[in-house]
Image (spheres, grey):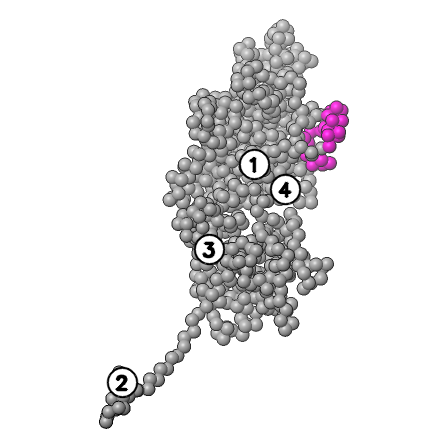
Amino acid sequence: MLNQDPNKLYFIEKDAIPKGVLANKNRAKSFLYGYNEKYDIIVISKTGQIGDIINISGLRVALPLAPKSIYKRSNKKEDQYWHSTDIPKELKRIQSIFQWHDMHGDFKNKWVDYIESEFDRREAGFWFHNDGIPTYITGTHYMYLQWTKIDIGNPDFREANRIFYIYWEACKADKRSFGMCYLKIRRSGFSFMSSCEGVNTATLAKNSRVGILSKSGSDAKKMFTDKVVPISNNYPFFFKPIQDGMDKPKTELAYRVPASKITKKNMYLTEDEELEGLDTTIDWKNTGDNSYDGEKLQLLLHDESGKWERPDNILNNWRVTKTCLRLGSKVIGKCLMGSTSNALDKGGSNFKNLFYDSDVLKRNGNGQTKSGMYSLFIPMEWNMEGFIDIYGMPVLKNPTKKTLGIDGEDIKQGAIEYWNAEVSSLTNDPDALNEYYRQFPRTESHAFRDESKQSIFNLTKIYQQIDYNDSLIKEQFITQGSFSWHNGIKDSRVIWTPNKRGRFFVTWIPKSNLQNNVIHKGGKFHPGNEHIGSFGCDSYDISGVVVGKGSNGALHGLTKFNMDEAPSNHFFLEYIARPQTAEIFFEEVLMACIFYGMPILCENNKPRLLYHFKNRGYRHFCLNRPDKTFNKLSKTERELGGIPNSSEDVKQSHASAIESYIEKYVGLDQTGMYRDSDDMGDMYFPRTLEDWAKFDISNRTKFDASISSGLCVMANQKHLYTPTEKKTKISINFGRYNNSNKTSELLR
């Protein structure tokens, strides 16, 4: 999340449009609904005027300008909150448009303004005072709150859902977007909200189709029969088209003839006049990679997307269904996808990839994300049942005054305190804890927390560190950037440049006196800061690979305990990437080593990186394997340096090095042996921490970050692996005698 405050779902962009331009365009009502390329905003206003521009997870959304007259439930601030209103009794008796046509003119005159206003709210949204604050909800959110019946009756107003609907409206308005990928908590109401959206869309669109998918065909069917159909049947007559078929269909809901929008112009329409048909349907499909293949969809409702298990694959399915939402390059339909996540090997991994492929801050040349969708995550504390007050706002911390919940009961505990207590009770049960994290995540990393069955490291400490890092503003601790040669001249000085597209992530930059500390001896280059730290690297030799295959190159930098102007025992650099060619990777690794003036330890089974260093005169930057004396090294090892990855002893030493570092410097040190027990570790790289959590010593090839970081620790602790040379000691003891007497006596 981009939010400056982790307890906020959005922030206001104050200077997105110059004030003069904003005033002039509002006066002319010239803001068009949709994506505004000039100001990089998505306008969801349908009045031609905009008010606040808010940033939700990187998406800049322009809200409608607040009207002069805003609905108030009460003049008292404390009594101002959302409440739905019942349909007037006189209208409730009317079940179809045909009954309306039969009513006399006076009756129609009485109610036509009410009906028109409901259509207006459905189209443009609704403003109301909430705890004294003018609050905007979208038209689809209004339909959910006012006209949708769920399992508990009328839905509650929640600020989290308001933001959800605003984000969803932006997805619909943006011509570049294929929809939303929503990472949610359990029982957030998504199934009902998406079902409402399906019915709302289908009762407006002509010649269209709405599709439903879930983690299984039976789940999709249940969503259709238990949610979609009842929502449709409970619509008031003026929103409900004529339905073709049964009142409670099992497979398809077909709107063959619509209820016409009632206006002053058509209010006297008779049933003898021909009505225009929508010819729109809602149906569901069995779960599979090719569901809806070759069909055109106006809307795809994708429920429980993070729970598709083998052989079903959500990524494969999305590649197919995405084509149902476009015609050539034009996006003609949207997908509303939402789910909690399973464990990574039970469908969660694919959903995780899809979620991060939907990051609005990472777009291709066409302005689209990799998946085409836009991702949204709302933390647990914003949407947890039992912790929402009557104004729809979350009670985050223990309240200091009487706080009434939306269920009419007092809230005496904050959502965060409740969550912390649950987490504490599960500390000794890692799998139960991880399941709780996935069901009720406070961070994205919680949502994708994996099972712990294969981990060989201390997961408690790793997850303590991950959770702590999630509470920080990442940009204040980690800088992204790249290295380059000064004036483009190789083997000169290396320059560091912060850059959002750079492949390096660093937490410490040495002062100028320590930068480029390279010692020249006999025409060769030696690292001048070896006493401060080292690098570890997991390299690769082949540039081109089959798409989706081939591991990344990884590089880590770690300091030792030192008295210089550098943090001690601190991972300061992370690089996990695969540039277009291996040569680019080699050069970037070399520049990092030179800039920091530190040696590197890497595996010698992929020797091209080592040859790159040697051929450029940097052989002395490449550490020899620490577990053998120099005279025991092979010819190649003497020539290049490096350490083999095939040795079982090396594998064990490598894993032990990571384990030792985690115990000492990651998470909390409850013993107080290495730092104060309340001080959290300072390992800030999430990808590496997550790699450690999943590391499998029997299948190391998938864990580039673990290989690299472990070699880094071994490089700094090389003295621990130095073998003790066995010396042959031949002791020759000459006897000593006492010769003072007549005979010599042996001294003992």
Mark 2: amino acid: Leu
Tell me the CA gap for discs 4 and 2: 89 Å
Label 4 or label 2, whichever lies nearer to me, is 2
Q: Are marks 2 and 3 in contact (CB under 8 Å)?
A: no
User: Which label's residue is closer to the chain start, 1 or 3?
Assistant: 1
Label 3: few (<14), some (14–19) or many (≥20) C-alpha neighbours in 10 Å: some
Which residue was labeled with disc 3?
661
Mark 4 / mark 2, whichever is N-terminal = 4
From mark 1 to mark 4, how far is it between C-alphas?
19 Å
Res 361 label: 4
Residue 555 lies left or right of residue 673; in this view the side is right
- Residue 43 place in picture, x, y as percent: 67, 30
Q: Which residue is mark 2?
A: 747
- Compare residues 105 and 348 and report the one nearer the observer: 348
Q: Are marks 2 and 1 in contact (CB under 8 Å)?
A: no
Q: CA distance from mark 4 to mark 3?
A: 34 Å
* 259 drawn magenta: no
What residue does disc 1 label? 5
- The reply to whether residue 407 is in sight is no
Instruction: Identify the residue at horizontal 63%, vertical 59% (top origin).
Output: 513
Answer few, some or many: residues within 10 Å of disc 1's Cα (few below 14, many 20 plus, some between 14 and 19).
Answer: few
Q: CA distance from mark 1 to mark 3?
A: 31 Å
Whether residue 17 is visible here, answered yes or no, is yes
